[in-house]
Each structure stands twice: as C-alpha cells, then as structure tokens.
Image: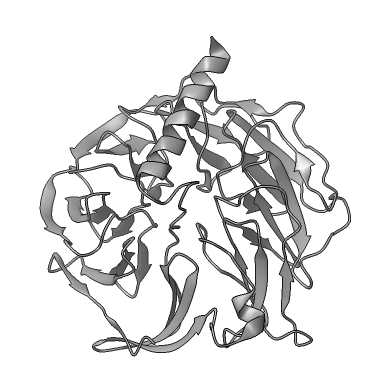
C-alpha cells in the first residue's frame, strides 16, 4: 500500500508534464531568468538560450545559443532546460533534459580548446537542473542516479563514480549544496545527505517523506524545506536528517515549489490553487490565499507584498501580513508561469512558457512586458 501511495503522485506528475507539452513526450522546459548587472540570461524557447542587455524599454538581444550556422553548436541537443544556467568563472554550464551538458564561453559560444566542453555520457534525463559547488557541479536524472562532475571538463571528480551514484527513485529536484554537504531528494520520497568532496553518505539512513519529492530548498537556520506530491511539507534538520516538527504541514494539493521566506514564515503555493503563509516554528497556517490556478513558481517578497504567479498566467499581489489580494493581472500572452519569479532592484521579473519576459512593480501593482528586441 505504501509503495502505491508513492507511485500514484509520480504517475500523475508525468501526466501533468506530458499534457502540458513540457514533459517526457515533448519537453518544453522552464527556468527562471538570471541577471548579471544589466544583462539578462533566459531560455526563451526550449533550449534557446539568450543573452540581452536591459534598457529603459526592455532588452536588446546580444546572442543566442545554439547558433544554427555553427556546425559544432548544431550538433548539441539539450532538448529543453529545466534549471538555471551555472556561471562558473569563464564558463556558462547548461544541463539539458536530453542528458547532455555543455560549457560555453561567457559570450555564449561553444569553442573547443578555449574552455568549452560537451558531454553526453549520463544515464537518463535531467529534470531539475544542476547546482554549482565550487569546482564541481551536481545533478540527478530520471534513471535514479546522482552525478557530481568537474566544472573544468564535465568529467569525473574524486569520490564520485563517473556513471553516477544509484539512489532509490528518480531525481526531479535540483540538488542543494550547503557548505560541504550535498542534499538530494527523489520521487521515491527519500532525502539524502552526502559529503560533497568524498561522496560519503552522512546520515545513517535517508529521511523518508512518504511521498514523491519533486523540489527541494535550503531556507536557512539549518532547515531544509521538503515538499511532496502528497501535499505534505516537511521541515528537516540539515545536520541530523530528522524532522524539525512532529508532523508535516498539510496543504490541499501537491506542493512542487520552493518557498519565499521572511521573518520565520514560509510562503508557497500548491496545485489546488492555494498559497500559504506557514509559521516555521510551529508549522501553523497563518493565512491562505486562493489564486486562480496551480502555483508552481517560487514567489517573491518585496516590502509588504508577496508576488505570486500561477499556471493560468496571472500575477497576484498579496498583502504579506494578511493574505488579502491587493491586485491581480492576467498576462494573456505569457502562457503558464512555472519558472521561479526573480527580484531585481525592487521589481519582479517573470518568464512565461511562451518565452515572453515581464516586469512587475509591487508599488503600482502593474505588470509590463519587457520585449527582447532584435531576436534573429
């Protein structure tokens, strides 16, 4: 019976991905935009990775990877990307759903002999994206394997087998690195802790959440936020691997997101359209807010406003203290909002599945499209 409880959410999750044309049959990808000064990096379409310079009117296109006119880049097939790019010195590392990985130069080009590399030697698909950890990066696959690889060439590193470490369950979440510890969760409901350098498992046994874990976050104060597709959220002690509270927080629907956290309160949504304010000390619900569709994207807090994006393409401005709606704006051309929202200089940036970029103002409760001009 317990195995059936674990499998049902996984089967439904695959159905959710496939029905949305972003899953295993036709992966679409979702990854939040990344900012470096006045440059924004974003996946505008599947594996189309774009850099653009921000200005008062939007953004001006600089380059796109891959460039179909370059034979070396045309041969790289990431298929779709579900995690953010990794900026590692003079390299930008991308990990694709296809299981392929590539390191680009900072100008977005694949240049062999000048720091670039391409690897396609992993087993399974990369759903959660990769995590940078110094001169290493870590990721998991749908074939139940955890990999730690070298930033320099994408190859093996001491302590970790080149063909990955087998775990119980598919890995859909992006691994988390805190200090020298690597945390990873599985769709079999397990949460593991490893020494990043040696590969040694640190807990006597993995934490068992009794439900598929499709996302994972470290929220400070030694706490891991562990959401499940059973609608339960566990707070796990990062050192001991034990639950901080005797019982999990119970949401109405699947929880497949990372929270925004401030002053001991976690704010997050579920797939039954609810948004929650959860007291981290007690696990008590302080308020709930009803959105208009599923909430997959990580929200953002600016001042006294929580900004939430839902799957229907609506941006919600919610009073942080009370959970009361201040305003909501539907973005009819955005598609679904699945990538995490990003704060930059007092604004919130939103990337929908249709590849359009938006900027939300928490003071005026407005949302404007910021067009990337000059795209080829």
Left or right side of 322 for 277: right
Q: Using the image, determine if residue 87 lies above or below residue 373.
A: above
Residue at the image position 57 percent from the left and 16 percent from the top: 3
Q: Of residues 67 and 276, which is closer to you in this image?
A: 67
Q: Of residues 357 and 124, which is closer to you in this image?
A: 124
Q: Using the image, determine if residue 35 lies above or below residue 165.
A: below
Q: Using the image, determine if residue 141 lies above or below residue 30.
A: above
Question: Can the viewer see residue 49?
Answer: yes
Q: Of residues 83 and 134, which is closer to you in this image?
A: 83
Question: Can the viewer see residue 91?
Answer: no
Residue at the image position 60 percent from the left and 87 percent from the top: 70
Q: Residue furthest right?
A: 158
Left or right side of 284 for 128: right
Residue at the image position 52 percent from the left and 16 percent from the top: 4
Query: What percent of the width, then of the height, locates residue 124?
Result: 66, 47
- Image quarter where the C terminus lies is bottom left
Asked which colour scheme the image uses, the reply is one colour
Query: What percent of the width, then of the height, locates residue 107?
Result: 57, 88
Query: What percent of the width, then of the height, locates residue 179?
Result: 69, 54
Q: Using the image, determine if residue 170 lies above or below residue 67.
A: above
What is the total number of numbered labels drawn onto the structure image? Answer: 0
Left or right side of 247 for 97: right
In the picture, residue 158 is in which quadrant? bottom right
In the picture, residue 58 is in which quadrant? bottom left
Q: Residue furthest top?
A: 1
Query: What percent of the width, then of the height, locates residue 291?
Result: 19, 43
Residue at the image position 33 percent from the left and 30 percent from the top: 253
């Amino acid at each position: 019976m317990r195995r059936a409880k674990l499998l049902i959410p996984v089967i439904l999750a695959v159905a959710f991905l496939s029905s949305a044309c972003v899953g295993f049959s036709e992966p679409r990808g979702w990854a939040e935009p990344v900012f470096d000064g006045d440059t924004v990096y974003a996946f505008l379409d599947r594996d189309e990775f774009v850099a653009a310079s921000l200005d008062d009117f939007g953004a001006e296109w600089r380059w796109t990877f891959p460039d179909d006119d370059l034979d070396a880049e045309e041969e790289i097939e990431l298929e779709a990307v579900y995690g953010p790019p990794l900026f590692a010195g003079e390299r930008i590392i991308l990990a694709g759903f296809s299981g392929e990985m590539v390191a680009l130069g900072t100008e977005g080009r694949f240049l062999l002999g000048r720091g670039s590399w391409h690897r396609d030697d992993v087993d399974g698909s990369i759903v959660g994206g990769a995590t940078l950890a110094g001169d290493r990066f870590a990721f998991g696959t749908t074939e139940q394997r955890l990999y730690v690889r070298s930033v320099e060439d994408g190859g093996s590193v001491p302590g970790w087998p080149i063909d990955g470490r087998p775990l119980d369950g598919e890995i859909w979440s992006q691994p988390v690195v805190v200090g020298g510890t690597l945390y990873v969760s599985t769709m079999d409901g397990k949460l593991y802790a490893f020494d990043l350098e040696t590969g040694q498992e640190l807990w006597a046994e993995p934490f068992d959440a009794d439900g598929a874990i499709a996302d994972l976050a470290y929220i400070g104060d030694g706490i891991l936020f562990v959401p499940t597709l059973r609608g339960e959220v566990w707070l796990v002690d990062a050192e001991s691997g034990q639950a901080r509270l005797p019982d999990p927080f119970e949401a109405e629907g699947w929880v497949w997101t990372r929270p925004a956290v401030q002053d001991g309160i976690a704010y997050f949504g579920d797939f039954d359209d609810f948004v929650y304010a959860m007291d981290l000390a007690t696990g008590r619900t302080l308020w709930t807010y009803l959105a208009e569709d599923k909430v997959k994207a990580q929200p953002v807090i600016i001042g006294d406003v929580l900004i939430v994006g839902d799957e229907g393409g609506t941006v919600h401005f919610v009073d942080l203290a009370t959970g009361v709606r201040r305003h909501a704006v539907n973005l009819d051309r955005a598609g679904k909002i699945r990538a995490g929202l990003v704060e930059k200089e007092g604004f919130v940036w939103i990337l929908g599945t249709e590849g359009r970029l938006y900027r939300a103002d928490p003071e005026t409760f407005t949302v404007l499209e910021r067009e990337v001009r000059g795209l080829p």
